[in-house]
Amino acid sequence: MVEVSSEMEQLKALILAKPIFAAIKTTCSFCVRFLSTIDKLKYADLTQTINERHHEPLLTKLREIVQKTYGHKTVPIVFINGRFIGGNDSFEKILKNIKNIMSLPRLDKSLVLTKDAVYKE
């Protein structure tokens, strides 16, 4: 059963707002590393983030959905063009192909946050 809610629609819109989306916690060392990598790549303008300070209800909802859908329990939660990448370790593994992944078409909104939205190399 597909969950439909205004929170879900808001999350999908945020995930698709820019090519890279990340849900982070400001105190998480893996999130800090992720943001540092984004800065080094000069992708800050291409990245939409949410965090616990400004988006707590959405972050909590996203973590529930991601854990249920993908089995991923930690932050950061990274998406590229609507496709679920995983956490910082998964993001670092795809860096060698980041330009190709960034050039993939944006996923249809109906597929975001579904099992069909996982990036596979």
Image (cartoon, helix red, strand yellow):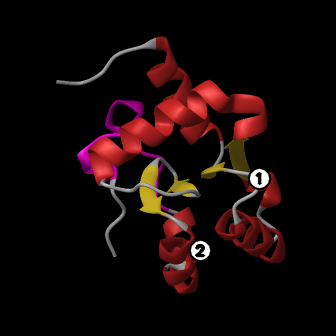
Label 2 SS: helix
Q: Amino acid at mark 1?
A: Thr
Q: Quadrant of the N terminus?
A: top left
Q: Amino acid at mark 2?
A: Lys
The residue carrying pointer 1 sits among few (fewer than 14), some (14 to 19) or many (20 or more) residues within 10 Å by Cα, namely some
Residue 74 part of the magenta segment? no
The residue carrying pointer 2 sits among few (fewer than 14), some (14 to 19) or many (20 or more) residues within 10 Å by Cα, namely few
Left or right: residue 48 compared with residue 89: right
Of marks 1 and 2, which one's residue comes earlier in the chain?
1
**Residue 61 locus on image (x, y percent):** 48, 30
Circle on res. 18: none
User: Is 33 or 117 nearer to us in this picture?
Assistant: 33
Left or right: residue 106 compared with residue 99: left
Quadrant of the rendered image containing residue 37: bottom right
**Residue 53 locus on image (x, y percent):** 78, 36
User: Is 23 or 52 nearer to us in this picture?
Assistant: 52
Does 22 appear above or below 91? above
Circle on res. 26: 1
Q: Can residue 84 be seen at all in this image of the molecule? A: yes
The residue that mark 2 highlights is: 99
From which residue to which does the magenta span run? Answer: 104-117
Does 115 appear above or below 90? above
**Residue 2 locus on image (x, y percent):** 24, 24
Given the current orientation, which residue lies at the most extreme bottom position?
A: 96
Label 1 SS: loop
Q: What's the distance in space between the residues labelled 1 and 2, CA to CA?
A: 27 Å
Does 73 appear above or below 65? below
Residue at position x 36%, y 63% from top? 119
Left or right: residue 85 compared with residue 102: left
Residue at position x 70%, y 39% from top? 52
- In this rendering, which labeled residue sits more in front, label 1 or label 2? 1
**Residue 51 locus on image (x, y percent):** 71, 42
